[in-house]
Image (spheres, rainbow, N blue to C red):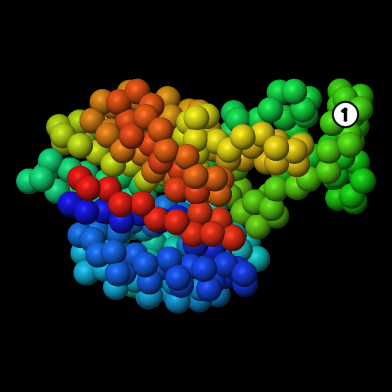
Amino acid sequence: MRLLVTADLHYNHGRSTALADEVIEQINKAGGDALMVVGDTAAYDGDAIERCLGRFTINGPKLFVAGNHELWTRGPDSDAIFREFLPKRVREMGWHWLETEPFVDRAAGLAIVGSVGWYDYGFAVPELGIPRRFYERGVSPGAALRVSGYESLRPGADDVSPHAREIVARWNDAKFVKLHRSDEAFLAELLDQLESQLTALRSVERVVVGVHHVPFAELLPPRHGEQWDFARAYLGSPRIGELLKRFENVRHVLCGHSHFGVETRIDHMHTINLGGGYRQKRFSVLEL
């Protein structure tokens, strides 16, 4: 099987749409037996998801993995979007909702599994000295101490170093993703589901995993500035990678989200961070 994979098309973003159209055209010309998009196709609100997915002309299976941006909404409930409304929209476009339905070709000894993944601040940079409560609210100490709406974080701010008080940054998932539970709890649910799927596929010779958030520290971008260092807490979780290492038939792992491309071997796995972002788009080809 020739599998084409891309991520982070951000089709609803003004400066990103034309670049996405270009890479989609390249993918269509490249030809393949199957296609997988690994998150951040577009935000949920509006019709950008349909406009983007409708441009692909690959005849084989088209496999969809959600990213954090698909859960962005100005409505009240991202959980209902993730569990019900987004899968319905994806299926109506003729795409395979990979989150709950692994693609399995037992005759070929191949399975493809997908997960949005998530984050639990496991990649946070300790040297920043930022207490956990700030990560939970998606705001750095410098922003929380300067912007209204974060007064509840300020009592006890003597545990924040003078250095951390100067870091001003926010993570917009905290504004646009409404899960009604903690990030850690959401990740735990996803990992339980992923573990169950991989366990059921132990007899399959080769498994490909597409997970939007970064599962391994080796696939993170280099540190470059304190605002970006604050954002590392939201790029993924080492718990995802720890789970994948337990399954020897997981041969390929692909992720996105960080907008930084990396390809390396980790244990028994060929791993790729696809590296697309707002200013450039990329795709990879796996000959399986």
Q: Is residue 266 above or below residue 177?
A: above
The picture places residue 281, in percent across and down from the top left corner, at 49, 59
The residue drawn where x is 39% and y is 55% is 283
The picture places residue 237, in percent across and down from the top left corner, at 53, 33
Q: Which residue is mark 1?
A: 163
Residue 166 lies in what quarter of the image?
top right
Residue 231 lies in what quarter of the image?
top right
Q: Is residue 233 above or below residue 285?
A: above
Amino acid at circle 1: His
Residue 158 lies in what quarter of the image?
top right
> Relative to residue 32, is residue 129 drawn left or right?
right
The residue drawn where x is 20% and y is 37% is 206
* Secondary element at tag 1: loop
Residue 241 visible within the image? yes
* Quadrant of the drawing holding the C terminus: top left
| Label 1 CA crowd tier, 10 Å (few <14, some 14–19, many 20+) | few
> Relative to residue 49, is residue 127 drawn left or right?
right
The picture places residue 94, in percent across and down from the top left corner, at 29, 70
